[in-house]
Amino acid sequence: MAKKVLIVGGVAGGATAAARLRRLDEEAEIIIFERTGYVSYANCGLPYYVGGVIPEKKSLTLQTPESFKRRFNIDVRVKSEVTAIDRAAKRVTVRNLADGSEYCEDYDYLILAPGAKSVVPDTPGVDSRRVLKLRTVEDALEMRRIVEEEKPRRAVVIGGGFIGLETAENLVEAGVPVTMLIRGDQVMPPLDWDMACELHAELRSHGVDLRFKHSVESYEETEDGVRVHVRDHESVDCSFVVLAVGVVPDTALAERAGLALGPKKSISVDSHMCCKNDRYIYAVGDAVAVRDPLTGKDKLVALAGPANKQGRIAADNICGIASSYRGTLGTTVLKAFGLTVACVGMNEKAAKAEGLSYDRIVGYWGNHAGYYPGAESMTVKLLFLRAPSGMPGNGRVIGAQIVGGAGVDKRIDVLATAIRKGMTGEDLAELELAYAPPYGSAKDPVNMCGFMIDNVLHRVQQMHWDEVDSCAELGYAVLDVRNPDEFAAGHIPGAINIPLDSLRERLGELDREKTYCVNCYSGMRSYIACRILWGHGFHNVRNFSGGWRFYELTHRETADYSHHPCGERK
């Protein structure tokens, strides 16, 4: 007898599950219920539709109820909300949102793909029609209408995560001035604060009014917009507000049905995407808790890639194929004006919370050979385990963050693969990656990360940007090995300047008993200087990780985007 599968929710997880089910079972009866008017749409493309980068509404729609029916013989019912699950009877109650009528539908298997919903703080005035969210196609249509028809004088974006940043960029590109109000001290929370500094500089360079430590107290409708009242700061007037302070699993239906729940009331599933207390109900996408491969703990990750994979795996298991989901690292990438920002695995906050013994490297390289025209630079930060020498796990990469121009996405994908497979710095150094001058370098940034990890583990000690200012009280001296013109343009207070190429001849000017923190532009020349000093009996030396460029970025949030290899800057 043909099985009957009901799917609650479309978009990524639900639509993928439905299509996979049909490819595996031509006889199954498959019905999708979707609350909105769109069953399969490019959720991640919504900000780009608001800004006009995606000009046509139809481009957002991947499948329609009609196309699903023609190609997959799947019954798609939009504007249909499942309001209750009777697990004992294996039946759901459905409300037709067009006319308010209700009916019941039986199932053999049920797949829940309700996604996540926008966090809406209980702030006075938050229900104003001028306080918008960007979660559905309908949301995007309304925001685009306001931008095109009303010519807003300013928008306020609340929150600095993916949706907030992408919406801010697209509004600016559409000619709408933007103020971003951030409750914390950085945008893009998956990044460490030091890596977010370059993103802050980029946003401000494009006119975004970026304000940290700003908590909204209330929204007040005015004659031509909204006044945003901020605790301990001046109010901000705007035409409309975009509320983008995060999402939470939309699991009220699952909770009412008594399904097992995990963090933040997410649906708890096993590796087959089956609900832990009901073998006939599966769940996928932003509403489920997933395992972190690095910690083994459950966490929430609202990303389209994992949702698609989970939908496929749920369909496999319903059809008798024992597929398993192996967890989510959370590989992400973001476009922010001229920058690409990407990360995977742990940041420092997460590593500290786990009590891990770790270290970090910061490097700065071009996306391809420097002598080939058009090279763009990227800043790369890697976290790796620091176990006792010779012990398992020493040098294993656990996190990566990259901010820069072209080529960032390519490297984060390689590093995501490396982290998933438990690779070490030594493994990165040995990777064979494609090289031709227009595409890369003979020593790719990924290889260079491996070389740096090996050096830090075996050949050089480091100091980081947040430690250098304490050099004086520790009795350390800062030795700057950049060229005199670079030094004159800006340097760490109290630094001594001896250019790298003069160092051997001027060793007599240095005190062998003193500890030196050695600095250059990006960390390459300073490492060479450390090795020279070590070879001449100076054993109290530390390389300044990230160099002057990173120091200036973290202290002043100013960024230099021109590409130049360390030592060739004029």
Image (cartoon, grey):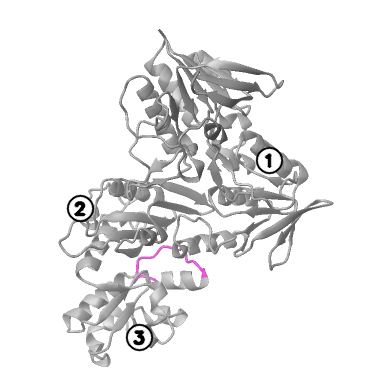
Q: Which residue type carries mark 1? A: Arg
Q: Which of marks 2 and 3 is in front?
A: 3
Instruction: Give me the residue at 35% from left, 75% from top.
Output: 520
Quarter of the figure that contains the C terminus: bottom left
Give the residue pinned by disc 3: 474
**Figure check: 356 above or below 106:** below
Q: Is mark 3 on a helix, strand or loop?
A: helix
Q: In which quarter of the image is residue 117?
A: top right
Quarter of the figure that contains the N terminus: top left
Q: Which residue type carries mark 2? A: Glu
From the viewer's perspective, is 315 left or right of 138? left
**Residue 491: x, y in percent?**
43, 80
Q: What's the magenta region?
A: 557-570
State the residue lying farthest toward the top.
Answer: 1
Q: Which residue type carries mark 3? A: Leu
Neighbour tally class for label 1: few under 14, some 14-19, many 20 plus, Cα within 10 Å: many
**Residue 121: x, y in percent?**
64, 50
Q: Which numbered disc, 2 or 1, marks the residue that appears first in the sequence?
A: 1
Give the residue pinned by disc 1: 144
Instruction: Give me the residue at 26% from left, 54% from top.
Output: 442
Give the distance between the C-alpha atoms of the residues marked 2 and 1, in whole angstroms.
Answer: 49 Å
Neighbour tally class for label 3: few under 14, some 14-19, many 20 plus, Cα within 10 Å: few
Give the distance between the C-alpha atoms of the residues marked 2 and 3, in whole angstroms.
Answer: 38 Å
- Identify which residue, 559 or 345, lies in the foreground: 345
Give the residue pinned by disc 2: 430
How many discs appear? 3
